[in-house]
Image (cartoon, rainbow, N blue to C red):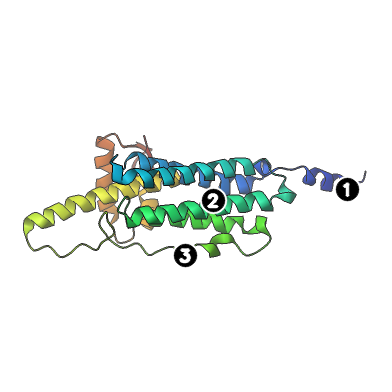
């Protein structure tokens, strides 16, 4: 067997788990998206009105996780079917999350972070599908706007008490967004967070991070400009 034939024979037995690009940009990112979904569902208030949607989100997340795990064992030169199943499972999960956001179970900003990460995964799937990337199945990632938990734009404050209440809600929303960013990206710097939370100053983000360290939600790795932050 000549060298060229040997290379072809070797490539024909290569599985996606051996493909560094697939493992890093599709499998690992999909795993993080699934982790974020379960983080969100575990923090949704357990009341009868929420249970059906929470169950739908978790079922879709498990289906996606199973699909991407299965895809790792697929032969690289025959990967299209398994990758397509994973792509459709991801799109189905995004649909469930959109419904949950409309019902007020998560903020618009958190959904936008997940959508952007999913869009990156779907774009990376393109070469494995032999056609246009599957991200065409998904609406363009939404522009992040400052909204309340139900997605409704907050009305101007008419009294100082209302202003203080809104500021507290906004502060909590930022913390939730920061947690979602860490859950999807792992260790992050202030600049990483600022790139997603446009319109929020790095000083404000730093104050939020310090508060979250004090409440043992996250920890700091490194010092000063080399500092990175990660969920506990």
State the residue at coordinates (28%, 37%): 213
Residue 139 is marked as 3
State the residue at coordinates (28%, 51%): 174
Q: Quadrant of residue 161?
A: bottom left
* Distance in Å between CA atoms under marks 2 and 3: 16 Å
Q: Which residue is mark 2?
A: 89
Q: Position of residue 62 (x, y in %)?
A: 50, 41
Q: Position of residue 171 (x, y in %)?
A: 23, 50
Work out whether residue 227 can be spotted.
no
Between 75 and 50, the residue placed more toward the observer is 50
State the residue at coordinates (80%, 43%): 10
| Quarter of the figure that contains the N terminus | top right
Between 189 and 230, the residue placed more toward the observer is 230
Q: Which residue is mark 1?
A: 5
Q: Position of residue 200 (x, y in %)?
A: 28, 58
Q: Residues within 10 Å of mark 2 (few under 14, many from 20)?
A: many
Compare marks 2 and 1 and give the one earlier in the sequence.
1
Q: Is residue 23 left or right of residue 74?
A: left
- Residue at disc 1, secondary structure: helix
Which residue is the extreme one toward the right? 1
- Residue at disc 3, secondary structure: loop
Q: Position of residue 201 (x, y in %)?
A: 28, 57
- Residue at disc 2, secondary structure: helix
Does residue 166 lie above or below 142 as drawn?
above
Compare marks 1 and 3 and give the one earlier in the sequence.
1
| Quarter of the figure that contains the C terminus | top left
Between 140 and 44, the residue placed more toward the observer is 44
State the residue at coordinates (43%, 46%): 56
Does residue 2 lie above or below 147 as drawn?
above
* Distance in Å between CA atoms under marks 1 and 3: 44 Å
């Amino acid at each position: 067997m000549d060298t060229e034939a040997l290379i072809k024979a070797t490539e024909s037995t290569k599985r996606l788990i051996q493909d560094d690009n697939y493992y890093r940009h599709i499998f690992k990112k999909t795993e993080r998206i699934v982790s974020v979904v379960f983080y969100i569902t575990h923090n949704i208030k357990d009341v009868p009105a929420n249970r059906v949607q929470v169950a739908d989100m978790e079922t879709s997340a498990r289906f996606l996780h199973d699909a991407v795990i299965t895809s790792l064992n697929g032969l690289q030169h025959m990967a299209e079917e398994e990758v397509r199943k994973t792509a459709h499972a991801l799109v189905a999960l995004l649909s469930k999350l959109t419904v949950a956001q409309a019902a007020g179970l998560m903020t618009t900003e958190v959904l936008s972070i997940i959508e952007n990460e999913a869009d990156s995964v779907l774009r990376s799937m393109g070469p494995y599908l032999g056609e246009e990337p599957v991200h065409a199945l998904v609406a363009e990632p939404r522009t992040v706007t400052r909204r309340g938990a139900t997605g409704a734009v907050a009305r101007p404050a008419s009294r100082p008490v209302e202003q203080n209440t809104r500021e507290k809600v906004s502060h909590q929303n930022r913390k939730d967004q920061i947690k979602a960013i860490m859950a999807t990206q792992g260790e992050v710097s202030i600049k990483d967070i600022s790139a997603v939370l446009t319109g929020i100053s790095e000083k404000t983000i730093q104050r939020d991070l310090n508060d979250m360290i004090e409440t043992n939600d996250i920890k700091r790795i490194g010092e000063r400009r080399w500092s990175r932050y990660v969920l506990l």
